[in-house]
Image: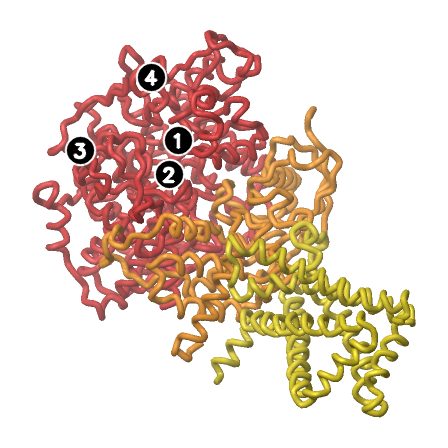
Chain colours: A yellow, B red, C orange
Amino acid sequence: MSWLYNSLNSSIGKKIIMAVTGVCLVLFLIIHLIGNLTLYGGFNAFNGYVRTLELVKPVIRVVEVVLGLIFIFHIFNGVRLWIENKNARPENYTVKGIRKNTTLFSRTMIQTGSIVFIFLVLHLSTFWVAFNFSGEPEHKPYQYYSIIMDWFKNPFYAGFYVIAVILLGFHLNHGFQSAFQTFGWNHKKYFPFIQKLGTVYALIMAIGFASIPIYFYFNGGN
Amino acid sequence: MKLDAKIPEGNLSEKWTNYKSNMKLINPTNKRKYSIIVVGTGLAGASAAATLGELGYNVKAFTYHDSARRAHSIAAQGGINAAKNYQNDGDSVYRLFYDTIKGGDFRARESNVYRLAEVSNNIIDQCVAQGVPFARDYGGVLDNRSFGGAQVSRTFYARGQTGQQLLLGAVSALNRQIAKKTVTLYNQREMLDLVVVDGKAAGIIVRNLLTGEIERHNANAVILATGGYANVFFLSTNAMNCNATAIWRAHKKGAAFANPCYTQIHPTCLPKHGEGQSKLTLMSESLRNDGRIWVSKSKKDLREPWNIPEDERDYYLERKYPSYGNLAPRDISSRSAKEAYDDGRGAKGGEAVYLDFRDSINRLGAKVIEERYGNLMDMYQTITGENPYKSPMKIYPAPHYAMGGLWVDYELMSTIPGMFVLGEANFSDHGANRLGASALMQGLADGYFVIPYTLSNYLASEKPALVDTNDKQFAEEESKTREYIDKLLSVNGKQTVDEFHKKLGRILWDYVGMARNEAGLKKGISLIREMREEFWKDVKVVGKNEDINQTLERAGRVADYFEFAELLALDALNRNESCGSHFREEYQTEEGEAKRDDEHYAHVAAWEFHDVGKWTRHQEELNYEYVKLATRSYK
Amino acid sequence: MSGNINVLLKIWHQKNANTKGGFVDYKVNVSPDSSFLEMLDEINNDLERKGEDPIVFESDCREGICGTCGLVINGEPHGPLRKIATCQLHMRNFKDGETIWVEPFRAKAFPVIKDLMVDRTALDKILQAGGYVSVNTGGVPDANAIPISKDLSSEAFDAAACIGCGACVASCKNASAMLFVSAKVSQLALLPQGHPERSKRVQAMVMVMDELGFGSCTNTYACEAECPKGISITNIARLNREFFNAKFKSSVLEY
C-alpha cells in the first residue's frame, strides 16, 4: 500500500485530502444548519429535533467519530501544508504583491481556519460537552434550549460566535470552489457558476449561523 | 586550402539516397564509444544532440543559457516550410528546392538545397509526433499559410510562435535523452576555443559562466550549432546574447568563413526610441498584407501622419513595384525604406517609415484587422505606447539573419576535419537571401536528418580513442584562453563594452548596411580597424574572471566582432555584384534593381584566416546543372 | 532631458545564495519610452564607467518569448502589467517620482545565484522526468495520419505557450510549480501523441516536482494572474484529474 501512502503524501494528494474532508464538512454544515434552524421554532420544535437525534444515538456516535476524524485530518493536513508552503519560500518578498493577484479569501485560509478552529473548541466545550455530559436525560431537551439561551445572552460569546461564523463564510467561499478545482472539475462553462454557488453557499452558512446568536441576544428566545 | 564540397554522384534527386546507401555505418554497440560535442541548443543543436543520443552516441551538449529552451530559435514567429503538398496546389520537392534557390538569388549549392527540400516533409511528421501543436483546420488536418517568395501554401505554423513550439519539441527530445543519460547537458558554459590536434577537431575550451572556471572537453567530433552573427550590428532582432564567438574562434583555428556579406535586413521592425535602445523587435511580415507603406513626399515633414493629405503621401513600394506592391521581398522593401528616410522623408524626418492600416480599416472594419493582427497590434502598443488603429505604425529595417557562416561541404563538415556546423552558423542553404519560414526548416533538417548520417560516415573511419584533456594541445589552448581573458580585464580604459559595440554597429550600419559601395566599404574597413585598436587601448571591463561576469562575457564577444566586422566588409568589397541581400550601388540596373554578375560571381567566397586583418579568399564555384539562372523580378 | 521621468529604484543585491542580501538605491532620470531592462542597462553602463560591478540580471530575447528575464517589480513578477514578460515592460507605466522595488524571484527551489539572477534549472529537471513524447527521430507516421480537432489542438497550444520563466512559482504564496507542470502535462494529455505515456508522465513529473522543494497548490490563482502567457488554471485542474486517474487506474507501483 505504499503507493497509496505516497500518493496521499504528494502535493496533489494533500490537496485531495483537503478537498475530500472539506466537502464532507461542507455537507455536515448544511445538516447542522437545518437542525439549528429549529431553534427559531421555540423550544418545542427544538425538543422534537433533539428527540429524533436521541432515537438514533448509536448512529450519531459513529457519525461524531467520523466527523471528528475528518476535522482532525482537515486541520492536521492544513497546518502541515501551511508549514511546508512557508518553507518553500525561506526569504519572503519585501514588497508583497499578493493583494494584486489573489482574493482575500484564498490567501487567508490558514487565519480564518485557525479562528474557526478556536471557535470549534469553544463551541464544543460549551454546547457539545454540556449537552452530552451534564444533567438528567429526561430534562435534557429543556436544558439544551436554556443552555443556548444563556450563552447567547453573553455579548462576548455571542459576538465571538458571529465573527467566527463570518470568517467561516470566508473560509467556505474559497474552499467550496477550491474543492472543485482540486478534483479537476474546472470547466470554462460551469466553473463560474460553481464559484457563484460557493459564494451563495458561504453566505447562507454565515448568515444562517450568525443569525442564531443575534436572535437570542436581542430576542432572548422567548 | 582546398574546398571540396563532396557532392555525391547521380541525378539531383538521387544524390541523398545514393549517399545514404553508400555511407559508412557504425555498429550500435560501438556507437557509445564515440563522444560528440554539440555546442548550442537551438533548433539545430537540440535536434542534433537528441537524435545522436537516441542513436547511442555519447553526447555532450553545451549552452550558455541556464536551459536549452532559451536559445533564440524560440523567437521565430512565422512558420516552417515543407513540400507536403497537403493543399493540392502543385507543390513538390522540386518546387521548394527551386523557390529556395531562386529566393537565394542563385548563390546556394544545388545539392544541399535539394536535400533540404527532400527532408522537409520528415520534419513535419517528426514534430507532430513530438506533440507540437501546429495550426489545424476544422477537419483535424494540418493547416498551411503562404509566405513570401512562393506561389504555393506550404508553411506550417503554430500561431505566431512556431519557433517556440518547434524548439520546445526538440528540447523535449533532448530532455528525454538527458534523462536517459545518453546526453549530458553543460549549461551556462560558453565555448571560447576549439582544440585541433593533428589537424582534426579534438575538443573545446569553455568558460563556466557562473564560476569563471575554464574547462577542457574532448570528443571525437565537434558540432557547432551556435547561430548567426547579426548582433555584430549591435541593434538587430537577435537576442542580447547571440554572438559569433564560437564560429569566429573556430574560423581562427582553420575553418573557412563563407559569404559573410550576406546579411538579411528585415523590413518590419519597430524603430529605435533613443540611444538607450538595446535591440530591435521584429513585427511579423504578414502585416504587409493589409498595411500600406508610405512616407511624406516632402523632406523634413514634421506634421503628424494623419495631418498629411493623401496627395502629399508617397506609397513608394506601390509606386515602384506595382505588381508586388507592399509585398515586395524583404531586401527590396528594406532598401526602399532606407532610401526614403536617408532622403529626409522618413516619419517626422526620422529613421522610420509608416505602415498604415487606415485604408484597410475603412474597407474591412477595425474588427477584421483586429482578428487578423490583434496580437501584433497589442505588441506595438505595449512597446511604443501608440495606438496603431488610430495612427500609422512606424517601422524600421533591422538586421535579422545571417546567410553567411562557416563553410561546410555536403556532409556539413567544415574545413577542419571532425568539426561540423549546423543551422544558421553554416552558410549552406540560403544563398544570398533567405525566404521566410526556411530558417526553421534548415535548422531541423540539419539536426534531425542530415548530421546523424554524415557524422556516422566520418566517425566510421576514426578510432574511438579520445585525445586526453591533459594533452599539451588542450593545456596550451586553455592557457591562451586565460591570457586572452586577462588581457581583456587588464586594459582598464575609459569606455564600456557596450559603448564600443554601439560604435561598431553604427559603422557597419552606415557603411556595410543595406546599400554598399566601394568607397564606403573602404572607409568602413579603416574605421573598423581604428575602432578595434581603440578598443584594445581603452575598453573598461570591470570585475574578475572567477565570478559571474556578464561584462566580461560581452567583452569577449565584442572583441571578436571587431575582427569579424572587417571580414564582413572585406567580403562585401570583393563581391563586385549585387545579389540578394548584398546590394552594391555600383551594380544596379537603370531602375535601381540588383544586378548580378553570374559570369564572375556565381561562386561561394570562403575566407581563410591567417591573422587579424589578413585573409585569403577562396572560391567554390557553383555549378548549376538543374536550374537555369534567371533575373529576379518583382515589378 | 525633457519628458523624462525620475524614479527611485531599490534594487536587490546579493553576492550568492549563502550570503544575506539587501537593497541598494539608484536615482535615475529615464525616458518613458525606455524599457525597464534598458533602464537597467544604462545604470550598469554608468556603474561600469565608474569601475563598479554592474547589477546582475538575466535577459535574452527581449521579445517576451525566451523566458530568461524575470524580476519581481513592486511585489509582482514581471511588473504591474498583465500578460507580458519583464522585457516588455516600459517606463511609461511608472509615474514621475515613483519608488520602484526590484527583487529576484524568491523560492527555495530557485536559489539566488547573484543579485537578481536565480537558478531555475529545477523546472528543467521536472521536464526531464517526463515532459516529452518518447519517439525517436524517424519512423513516425505521416503528420496528417491522426486528425486532431482544431479546438483540441488550440487548447493544447494554449498550454504549450508556457515560456518557462517561473513567474508562476515566484507569484505563488506557496512557491508552487503547479501551473508550469500542468501546462506541459495538459499539452501532452490533450494531444493523442501524448496518450501512450500519460499515466507515467504525470506521476513522474509530480514526484520530481515535490522532491525539488516547490510548495503545494492552494488554488489562490496568483499564477494565472501573473503568467506572461496567460496560462489558465484549468490546466491545473486537468493535472489533478490526470494525477488522480493515473494513481487509481494504473497498475504500475513504481510511483
Distance from Cα at disc 4 to Cα at disc 2: 31 Å
Residues at marks 1 and 3 on the same chain: yes
Residue A175 horizontal side relative to residue A181, left or right: right
Distance from Cα at disc 1 to Cα at disc 3: 33 Å
Q: Residue at x 37, y 54 (%)?
A: B169
The residue beneath circle 4 is B585
* Residue B2 appears in the picture as rendered: no
- Identify the disc placed on residue B78: 2
Q: Secondary structure under badge 4?
A: loop
The residue beneath circle 1 is B285
- Identify the disc placed on residue B621: 3
Q: Secondary structure under badge 3?
A: strand
Amino acid on which the number 3 mark rests in the picture: Glu
Give whichever of discs 4 and 3 has the lower sequence position. Answer: 4
Distance from Cα at disc 4 to Cα at disc 3: 24 Å
Residues at marks 4 and 2 on the same chain: yes
Give whichever of discs 1 and 3 has the lower sequence position. Answer: 1
**Mark 4 residue crowding within 10 angstroms, few (<14) / some (14–19) / many (20+):** some
Q: Residue at x 51, y 47 (%)?
A: C229
Q: Are marks 2 and 1 in contact (CB under 8 Å)?
A: yes
Q: Secondary structure under badge 2?
A: loop
Amino acid on which the number 2 mark rests in the picture: Gly
Q: Residue at x 65, y 70 (%)?
A: A26
Residue A61 horizontal side relative to residue B291, left or right: right
